[in-house]
Image (cartoon, rainbow, N blue to C red):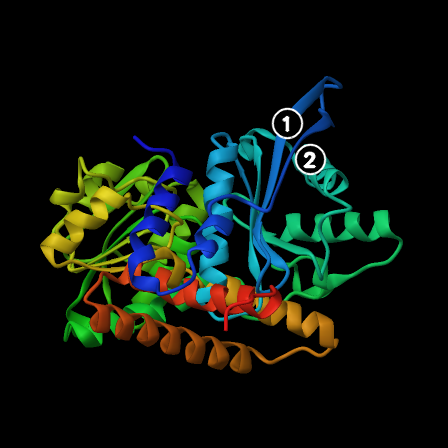
Amino acid sequence: MANAFENAMRQLEKAKKYAGVEPELFQILGQPKMIFQFMIPVKMDDCSLKIFNGYRVQYNDARGPTKGGIRYHPQVDLNEVKALAFWMAMKCAVANIPYGGAKGGVEVDPKKLSQRELELLSRGYIRAMKENIGPETDVPAPDVYTNATIMGWMADEWGLVHGHYEPAMITGKPLAIGGSLGRDDATSRGALHCIREACKLRKMDPKRTTVAIQGFGNAGHFLAKLMNEEGFKIIAASDSKGGIYDPNGLNVPELLKVKEQKGSVQEYSGGKKITNEELLELQVDILAPAALENVITKSNADKVRAKIVAELANGPTTPEADEIFERKGILLIPDILANSGGVSVSYFEWVQNRQGYYWSLEKVQKRLAEKMTSEFNAVWNISQEKKIDMRTAAFVLALKRISSAVEARVYSDKK
């Protein structure tokens, strides 16, 4: 199987012939602008010293400061971080916010760390990157297995190192130190706006529409909650330990409580236990992969029976699977569009930090709804005009916006 970065470059190559931009842009986007790889020493609770591998990739900054989360996961490696940083550059352009793309990660299983060890690791990450992140250069955020608490530690450490607190250096913070209302469920709420638009196109009534969610972290958790409130029927959900399925619909409030109290959706008392792989192949109207990369490949894409696939995870579908979906007529809402609600509200948080003026929840959610609906329809219109799939259309839109920024900043002798 190709690694995540190779898949990302294949997606870029597919969009090349439709984008109508200068070929030099593809040279620029063929590799990251800057790569940081470093070690983070942590004195563990047992007084031993453990070294963790840290990464940060700043991919492209043509449209503004680079932007992207920091993930803690045992499978983090440089190829993955490069791919995620590239997708962030595309995502920020699709969302039409003035950022480039970046991503960071630490190769660690955070579940095996104490709270103290987790804080030392987080502060160590910031010390390693102290000269290369900031509100006007590179703005981190939460990602897989990181959260508002960790962002708070990182913001505090950056302030200690630089001698002053600067809330705009990181987003996804606790409200008490400059976070934004509406950030906790922004990724899922943004995806919901896209799903609504897709349902209109497919003439699907939410109250008669079944949903399966693979991955029950922050994004999957909130998507289940929000879709249940709108009347969608959630019939399956899964996390790293496995899934649960009930064709009559899961009791979502009870499922959320079980996940919080017992650590896995498989502890839910109703329904049938299934694997993550089985969930992807269920007879369902909407499938939302909300976990990690490369879960839908050429080996299982033909077994996917959903009418709509909404990618809340980054890179869950490989290029070969995309072709199978296109052949089957499955409407795919690509990651760089579907999950861009998170970075959009991160941008709103950064704007509020810079202004020192904070918005109401109503204002945040209204602006998010406007942005997601507008960009979904912009991507859909390109896909119809050029007769291409939604992912390629999203890349075309992103490439045109990045190209305009590059051309505005770089001298050209073309008449």
Tell me the number on the disc at residue 121. 2
Relative to the observer, which residue lies in front, 6 or 13? 13
Residue at 61% from the left image edge and 66% from the top image edge: 409
Mark 2 vs 1: CB contact within 8 A: yes
Task: From the top left corner, tell me how far across and down residue 376 is, in percent.
Answer: 34, 72
Q: CA distance from mark 2 to mark 1?
A: 8 Å
On-image quarter of the N terminus: top left
- Left or right: 242, with 175 as reference point: left
Tell me the number on the disc at residue 235. none
Quadrant hosting residue 177: bottom right
- Res. 186 visible in picture: no
Quadrant hosting residue 174: bottom right
Residue at 12% from the left image edge and 51% from the top image edge: 305
How busy is the neighbourhood of tag 1: few (under 14 within 10 Å), some, or many (20 plus)?
some
- Left or right: 32, with 243 as reference point: right
**Badge 1 is on which residue?**
52
Q: What amino acid is at disc 1?
A: Phe
Task: From the top left corner, tell me how far across and down residue 61 is, in percent.
Answer: 60, 57
Relative to the observer, which residue lies in front, 88 or 106? 88
